[in-house]
Amino acid sequence: MTKTLLCGMLLLLAGGVQAGDWPQWRGPYQNGSANERNLPAVWSATENLVWAVDLPGPAAATPVVAGGRVFVSSTAAGSPDLLALCFRARDGKLLWRRQAGTVKRTPPSNTMASPSPVTDGKRVYFFYGTGELAAFEVDGTPRWSRDLAQEYGQFSLMFGYSSSPLLHEGRLYIQVLRCQKPYEWSGPGEWPTDSFLLAVDAATGKTLWKHARQTDARDESQDAYTTPALYGRGRQAKVLVAGADYVTAHDPATGEEVWRLAFNPRQRRNWRLIPTPVPGNGLVYAVTPRGRNPLFAIPADRSGTLAWSDLAWTFERDTPDVCVPLLYRERLYVLDDTTPVLSCLDAATGRQIWQTPLKAGGPYRASPLGADGKVYCINEAGEVTVLAAGDTLLVLSQFTVGEGPCQATIVAAAGRLFLRTAKRLWCVGQ
């Protein structure tokens, strides 16, 4: 058993979810991979389709799957409603639908339903770019709700708030890394002056702690669309936050900062960050902004203020602006989402094993999935490329689903693939 897989299994067990679930944004191991088997390399409306159901509106949120249910955040066409949806995984039957938020203002390229839900298999938590956070039993019974933007000030990001919650040991971790001045789409109201990491009791919705995250970032560089990630377990666990010119690690119990690394030495003012950090192999893999800038591996066991010389390795070409790297079977798959080029790296050393342009052109907004010995990529137009995972470059298939813009990541769970397009939720399998 590989070190990456062992660490991932421990993380899965610690979280209380079951094998075969995809409980949060980057999956059961927070690295974009799953242990599912017998997954198709091609599908269409007539091939390998288990079911497909219409959705009430478009969104970028990735579905989560647990206990035979698929949970989806959505907009409602022609309405300001933000919806929490639950479908039965085996046949796509809608089990329940709840209004959980309301769109007040819309920034460019964001429906405010970009954050993905998260579940422990007993309850499910929906969060929206408006700051509205709602908890439900998996049968749809409401438990509690809050409006974090009303409590802590507007979520002021140029392209709208998109971070998903992290759920760990009964706590929701939510980061708000935001600009301290209004953008053109922002409405009136008192303007926030801080960024923070928040811990919320998942059972009650009450705040456990709020940690101010210090930064000297300026203007748009204060914005981050990343999601908190968890490294390790027990006393070694750390909550990872990337953005506003730094990657930081925090004590899950208190929010206290354990270490930080700066990645914007030139103090650029437009250095907003989108890809979430990826934990694994004793390292934290992180990306600098705007593509074709360094991807780097940070030793996770450090403390204090780190320097570039502390890094395990860097990779400085064909890196993503949006897509999160995939860590799968000791390899790191890095998708330059504009060119587009996919690179396979040795996750321990950063050595490039192979690299290939993808014939399905960019942009890509969904991150790669690793499952069943395959790597799945989908671009915004709904064109899918499937490659063999491993050290030999092999493209297995390329085909078009359409129904763009496709911005949600393909999910592997319960022996199936789940794909959310702008129009429908697909379930495919052999």
Image (spheres, helix red, strand yellow):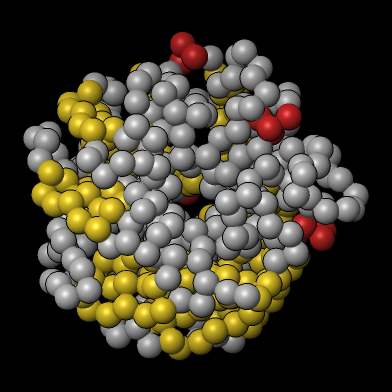
Q: Quadrant of residue 133?
A: bottom right
Q: Is residue 76 left or right of residue 357?
A: right
Q: Is residue 188 visible?
A: yes
Q: Quadrant of residue 391?
A: top left
User: As displayed, is residue 269 above or below residue 180?
Assistant: above
Instruction: From the viewer's side, name the closer residue of 258 and 89.
Output: 89
Instruction: From the viewer's side, name the closer residue of 87 and 383.
Output: 383
Q: Is residue 207 visible?
A: no
User: x, y (%) of residue 82?
Assistant: 62, 72
User: x, y (%) of residue 420?
Assistant: 39, 66
Instruction: Please identify the quadrant where the C terminus is shown.
Output: bottom left
User: As displayed, is residue 89 above or below residue 4?
Assistant: below
Q: Is residue 282 left or right of residue 238?
A: left
Residue projecting furthest to the right: 190
Q: How many marks?
A: 0
Q: Residue at x 59, y 19 (%)?
A: 264
Q: Residue at x 38, y 28 (%)?
A: 319
Q: Residue at x 28, y 33 (%)?
A: 341
User: x, y (%) of residue 110?
Assistant: 59, 54
User: As displayed, is residue 79 above or below residue 386?
Assistant: below
Q: Residue at x 78, y 50 (%)?
A: 186
